[in-house]
Image: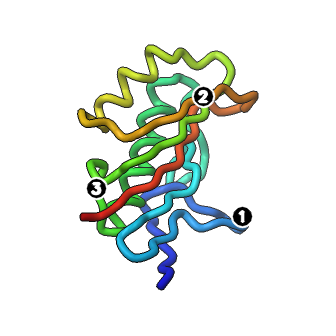
Amino acid sequence: MREIILTDKAQQPEGMPYSQAVKVGNTVYVAGQGPFDPISGLCEDSTLEYQARRTLDNLKAILEEAGAQMTDVVKVTVFLGAGADFNEFNIYYKEYFSAPYPARAITGVNSDILVQIDAIAIIE
């Protein structure tokens, strides 16, 4: 059975055709999250530090709404915008994930934001 996950503690779809996450059984599929404040809907700072943490906070809030934790994440895809420093991003990433880390893919994109992340979690 499919359950749509929605929390007001993360960026809102605001009429866009996607769900924050979809939970099927014990698996949670989180849509790509960016550095958008859940209240204002805006990216309020242009620094990589702010954008990485805001994006990861959005991801965490959605997982918690689904009954999952960051430690339940098994796969992430990270999209880094032009100018985002890979090594600096890893500093913030490691504040939210620890070993054993989820599988991860990172790609660069031409985007106005510096970070977007989607994830798959399995609740055990």
Can you tell which of label 2 and label 1 is closer to the viewer? 2
Residue type pointed to by label 2:
Leu
Report the residue at 31% width, 29% height from top.
Answer: 94
Residue 112 to residue 84: above or below: below
What label does residue 80 carry, if any?
A: 2
Image location of residue 122, percent across then percent down: 35, 60
Secondary structure of the residue carrying tag 1 is loop
Q: Is residue 78 left or right of residue 87?
A: right
The residues bearing labels 2 and 1 have C-alpha atoms spaced at a distance of 22 Å
Report the residue at 45% width, 23% height from top.
Answer: 89
Q: Is residue 67 left or right of residue 12?
A: left
What label does residue 16 carry, if any?
A: 1
Q: Is residue 113 left or right of residue 110?
A: left
The residues bearing labels 3 and 1 have C-alpha atoms spaced at a distance of 26 Å
Report the residue at 54% width, 40% height from top.
Answer: 77
Q: In terms of depth relative to the viewer, which is nearer, 76 or 49?
A: 76
Q: Quadrant of residue 17?
A: bottom right
Identify residue for label 3. Answer: 69
Image location of residue 75, percent across then percent down: 44, 46
Secondary structure of the residue carrying tag 3 is loop
